[in-house]
Image (cartoon, rainbow, N blue to C red):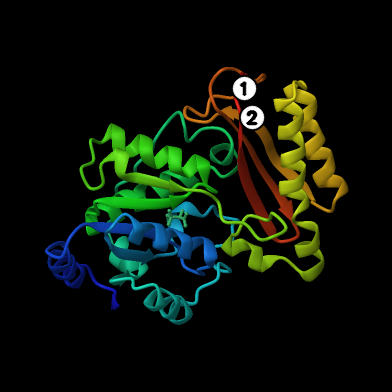
Amino acid sequence: MRIIHHKPTLRTAIASLRSAGKIALVPTMGALHEGHLTLVREARAVGAQVVVSIFVNPRQFGAHEDLDAYPRQLEADAALLAQEQVAILWAPGVEEVYPAGYATNISVSGVSEGLDGAARPGHFDGVATVVCKLFNQVQPDFALFGEKDWQQLAVIRRMARDLDMAYPLVENIIGVPTAREKDGLALSSRNAYLTTQEREQAPILAAAMREAIAAMEGGAAVGPALALVQDKLLAGGFSSVDYVALHDADSLTPLTELGKAPARLLVAARLGKARLIDNMAVRPLG
Ligand code: PAF
């Protein structure tokens, strides 16, 4: 595995990798866990040479968010990726991605509004901008993202469609189901912020969501089912709830009742220093 920090070296390495076949990109911010490694394995399963990027993107963190505290462990991450037969680890510094004079922003309206877009103003502009740059730098045939960040995936697909991106084509942007601990907690680099006691409380999130989904799919009204999730989180040690919401799975339009199209239950809540997000499918009415 080659570890590359500068664009000219990347360009040459990508050209020679391309002569060996298709390329799949797995964009990450590092602090890799089993969820990221699942993305890498899925990338290899599409028959591509795998490039993983590690870049903690300052533009997607708000002024009071955890940019400085975000875990950075390049050596340990590189060792994990080498075991997964990754061809290139692309690990640029901030100056390489946003050199002096950098002035361009990508903003995707619609799907990036509401949910994390409302709770974290500017976050999805930062994500869309850096992902567009990573796509241009690596020019992958495929790109893989975790479904845990459901709204992020919708924003990236919208951007690729709207900008007529060819590397990758929108249909080659692959969403991979959320990897979970045995107790249901969605894997996330931010789980590292949880204390031992908070880690024991955290699975309430997935359990409350499953309960609400079973109720809604069984015919219960949406409003009370969502309120139940909020109550369980606050009673279970979470300090605040940013949102508990039901949305159309594709357009992310808010829903007040289940319809005939697939829906998604999405939640963001704070437990200690960690802001946990999760989402799950809700079956449409038969
Ligand atoms: O999901 C992430 O880790 C980041 O938002 C991404 C897609 C790597 C962009 O910085």
Q: Amino acid at mark 2?
A: Leu
Position of 164 with respect to 74 (left or right) is: left
- What is the quadrant of residue 272 in the picture? bottom right
Q: Earlier in the sequence, mark 2 or mark 1?
A: 2
Against 90, residue 157 (above or below) is: above
Tell me the quadrant of ligand 1: bottom left
Q: Relative to 48, say whether 69 is above or below.
A: below
Residue at 30% across, 44% down: 172
Q: Quadrant of residue 194?
A: bottom right
Q: Tag 1: residue type?
A: Leu
* Labels 2 & 1 near each other (Cβ < 8 A): yes
**Mark 1 Cα within 10 Å, few/some/many (few <14, many 20+)?**
some
CB at disc 1 and ligand 1 closer than 8 Å:
no
Q: Quadrant of residue 43?
A: bottom left
Tag on residue 255? 1
Nearest to the observer: residue 164 or residue 70: 164
Locate the N terminus by quadrant.
bottom left
Q: Residue at x 45, y 28 (%)?
A: 110
Q: Front-most of 115 and 225?
A: 225
